[in-house]
C-alpha cells in the first residue's frame, strides 16, 4: 500500500473503533438503566468521574512523564543531530518546533507527548543517538512528530475517558445490585432479562473496553509510521531504526507501565508476543509487521 | 409560510458554504506565500554560513587562491540574482564551487581534523536539508490548494473569485543535469 492509502486506512480504522466504543457505552447505559429500573444508569456520573481523572494526565501529562523519566533538556551543541533533525522536520511539517529532552540510557527509544503542536514535547534516549545514524533518527523523530500532528495524545485521552466511563458504570451497576435497589419499577418482567445481560456486560465490558483501547493504540502507531514516512519521504529510515530497536537487548529503565504506550517500541523487552491472542494486549504492533509495511510503501 | 422557510434555509446554507470556501482559499493562498518566503530564509542561512567556511579553510590552505575566489564570486552572484532562473543558476555555481572547496580540504589532514571546520561542514549539510524540506513543505501546501481549487463544486466558485492553480517548485533543467566538481 502507498503511504497515503496507509494513512487513510488507519485513520478510518481508528475512528471505526471509536464509533464502536461509543456504541458500547450507549448499550451499557441502556441495559443498566433497564435492569435497575431507574431508566438511567449513573452513566452521567461515570462520564464525569472519568473526565476528572483524565484531566490531569491530559493537561500535565508531559511534565509528569518528563519528571518520571529523569530527562534533561536537549541542547543544539551537545545533541546536534537530534536538534537539527527536529528543526528540519518541523519545517517539513509546518509546525512550531517541539521542546526536546534527552534521557541518559543506553536503550534505544523515544516518545512524544503534548495535546497539540503548540504544546509538544519529544524525548529520546542517548542510546538512540549513539546507535542510530542520521537517516534512522529522522525516521524515529518523524514518527513521534506525527503522533503530535495527528492529535494522537488527544485521541488516547478521549479513549481513556471512554474506558473510565465503562469501568465506573459497570462498577456502579454491580454495587447497586449488591446493596439492593429501593424503588423497583413496575416492569418486573423486563428487569429479569436485562439484569442477566447487565451482569454479564458489567463483568465483560471493562475487558472489551481495554481491548478496544489497545486496538486503537496500535492503529495510531501504524498511522504515525505512515505519516512519518510522508514527512521524510524515506520509509527505509524508520524501517532500519525499528530493526535496530527490535534487536536491542537493553531494557529502558525509566519506563513504567503507565508510560509504556507513549514510546516508539514496547520498552519491556522479553515480552514479544507471538500468538494472535496475546498480541491483542499489546500497545504497539509487532516490529516485523511495521517494517514489512514500511518497506512496501 | 413553510416553503418560504425551507427556501430561506437552503439559501442560508449555500451562502455559509460559499463564505467558508472563499475564506479557505484565502487562507491556503497566504500559507503558500509564507511557505515560499520560508525557502528564502533557509537559502539566506546557507549564504551566511559561507564566509566562515572560507575563513576556516584559508587558515590552512592559503595558497589555494583560485578555489576561494570562485566561492566568493559565486556567493556574490547569488546575492545579486533577481529572477528565479538566475537564482537557480547562481545557486548551482555556488554548489559546484563549494564542492571544489571541500575536495581541496581533503588534502589537508590538519584541516579535516579541525573542530571548527567539521562543525561548519555539518551546518552546511544541515542547511541543504533545511532548504529541501522547506521546498517540500511549499509543494505540499501548493498541492492542498490546487486540490481545493480543482474539485467539484469548488472549481466553479474558484473561477468566479479568480483563484487559480499555483505552480510547484521544480528543478531547473540545469539542476537536473548534475553538478560539476573542478580541481
Image (cartoon, coloured by chain):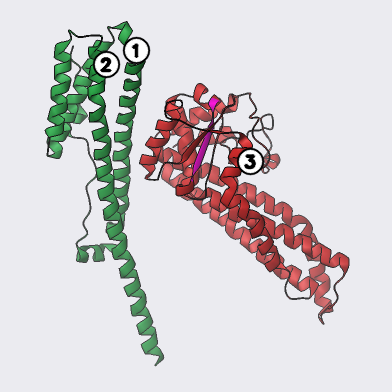
Chain colours: A red, B green
Q: With B156 as the anchor, is A229 left or right in this view?
A: right
Magenta span main SS: strand
What is the x, y in percent for residue B72? 16, 22
**Closer to the eye: label 2 or 3:** 2
* Residue hosting label 3: A259
Chain for numbered disc 3:
A
Is residue A9 rendered to the left or right of residue B81? right
Residue shown at 73% from the left, 55% from the top: A206
**Depth check: A274 or A15 in front?**
A15
Q: How many marks?
A: 3
In the rendered view of the protein, which quadrant contains the C terminus of chain A?
Answer: top left
Alpha carbon distance from label 2 to label 3: 47 Å
Highlighted magenta segment, given as a residue range: A120-126
The vertical placement of A274 against A155, above or below, is above
**Label 3 element class:** loop
| Residue tagged 2 | B56
Q: Which residue is mark 1?
A: B114
Please, what secondary structure does the residue beneath circle 1 have? loop
Chain bearing tag 1 is B
Letter of the chain that mark 2 sits on in the rendering: B
Residue at (27% x, 32% y) in the render: B45
Left or right of A273, for residue A75:
left
Q: CA distance from mark 2 to mark 1?
A: 9 Å
x then y, percent, for residue A28: 71, 65
Q: Camera-side residue: A129 or B1?
A: A129
Element type at marker 2?
helix
Query: In the rendering, at what x and y percent does residue A64 appear?
Result: 61, 43
Q: Are marks 2 and 3 on the same chain?
A: no
Label 1 CA crowd tier, 10 Å (few <14, some 14–19, many 20+): few
Kindly report the distance in space between the C-alpha atoms of the residues bearing marks 1 and 3. Answer: 43 Å
Are callouts 1 and 3 both on one chain?
no
Amino acid at each position: 500500500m502507498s503511504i497515503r492509502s496507509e494513512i487513510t486506512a488507519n485513520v478510518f480504522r481508528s475512528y471505526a473503533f471509536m464509533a464502536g466504543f461509543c456504541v458500547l457505552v450507549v448499550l451499557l447505559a441502556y441495559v443498566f438503566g433497564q435492569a435497575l429500573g431507574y431508566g438511567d444508569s449513573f452513566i452521567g456520573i461515570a462520564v464525569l468521574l472519568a473526565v476528572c481523572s483524565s484531566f490531569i494526565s491530559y493537561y500535565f501529562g508531559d511534565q509528569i512523564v518528563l519528571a518520571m523519566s529523569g530527562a534533561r533538556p536537549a541542547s543544539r551543541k551537545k545533541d546536534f543531530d537530534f536538534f537539527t533533525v527536529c528543526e528540519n522536520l518541523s519545517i517539513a511539517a509546518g509546525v512550531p518546533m517541539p521542546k526536546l529532552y534527552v534521557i541518559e540510557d543506553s536503550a534505544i527509544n523515544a516518545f512524544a507527548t503534548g495535546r497539540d503542536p503548540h504544546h509538544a514535547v519529544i524525548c529520546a534516549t542517548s542510546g538512540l543517538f549513539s546507535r542510530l545514524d542520521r537517516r534512522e533518527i529522522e525516521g524515529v523523530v518523524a514518527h513521534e512528530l506525527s503522533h503530535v500532528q495527528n492529535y494522537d495524545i488527544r485521541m488516547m485521552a478521549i479513549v481513556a475517558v471512554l474506558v473510565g466511563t465503562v469501568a465506573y458504570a459497570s462498577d456502579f451497576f454491580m454495587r447497586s445490585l449488591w446493596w439492593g435497589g429501593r424503588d423497583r419499577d413496575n416492569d418486573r418482567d423486563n428487569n429479569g432479562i436485562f439484569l442477566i445481560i447487565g451482569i454479564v456486560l458489567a463483568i465483560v465490558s471493562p475487558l472489551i473496553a481495554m481491548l478496544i483501547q489497545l486496538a486503537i493504540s496500535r492503529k495510531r502507531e501504524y498511522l504515525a509510521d505512515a505519516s512519518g514516512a510522508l514527512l521524510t519521504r524515506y520509509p527505509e529510515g524508520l524501517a532500519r531504526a525499528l530493526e535496530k530497536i527490535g534487536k536491542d537487548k537493553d531494557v529502558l529503565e525509566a519506563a513504567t507501565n503507565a508510560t509504556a504506550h507513549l514510546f516508539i517500541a514496547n520498552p519491556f523487552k522479553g515480552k514479544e508476543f507471538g500468538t494472535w491472542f496475546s498480541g491483542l494486549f499489546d500497545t504497539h504492533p509487532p516490529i516485523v509487521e511495521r517494517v514489512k509495511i514500511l518497506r512496501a510503501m | 409560510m413553510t416553503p418560504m422557510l425551507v427556501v430561506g434555509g437552503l439559501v442560508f446554507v449555500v451562502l455559509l458554504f460559499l463564505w467558508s470556501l472563499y475564506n479557505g482559499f484565502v487562507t491556503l493562498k497566504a500559507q503558500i506565500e509564507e511557505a515560499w518566503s520560508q525557502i528564502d530564509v533557509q537559502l539566506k542561512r546557507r549564504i551566511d554560513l559561507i564566509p566562515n567556511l572560507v575563513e576556516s579553510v584559508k587558515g590552512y590552505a592559503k595558497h589555494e587562491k583560485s578555489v576561494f575566489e570562485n566561492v566568493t564570486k559565486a556567493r556574490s552572484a547569488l546575492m545579486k540574482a533577481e529572477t528565479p532562473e538566475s537564482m537557480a543558476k547562481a545557486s548551482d555555481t555556488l554548489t559546484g564551487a563549494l564542492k571544489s572547496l571541500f575536495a581541496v580540504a581533503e588534502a589537508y589532514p590538519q584541516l579535516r581534523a579541525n573542530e571548527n571546520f567539521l562543525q561548519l561542514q555539518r551546518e552546511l549539510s544541515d542547511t541543504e536539508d533545511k532548504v529541501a524540506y522547506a521546498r517540500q513543505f511549499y509543494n505540499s501546501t501548493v498541492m492542498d490548494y490546487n486540490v481545493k481549487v480543482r474539485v467539484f463544486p469548488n472549481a466553479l466558485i474558484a473561477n468566479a473569485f479568480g483563484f487559480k492553480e499555483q505552480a510547484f517548485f521544480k528543478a531547473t533543467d540545469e539542476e537536473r543535469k548534475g553538478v560539476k566538481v573542478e580541481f
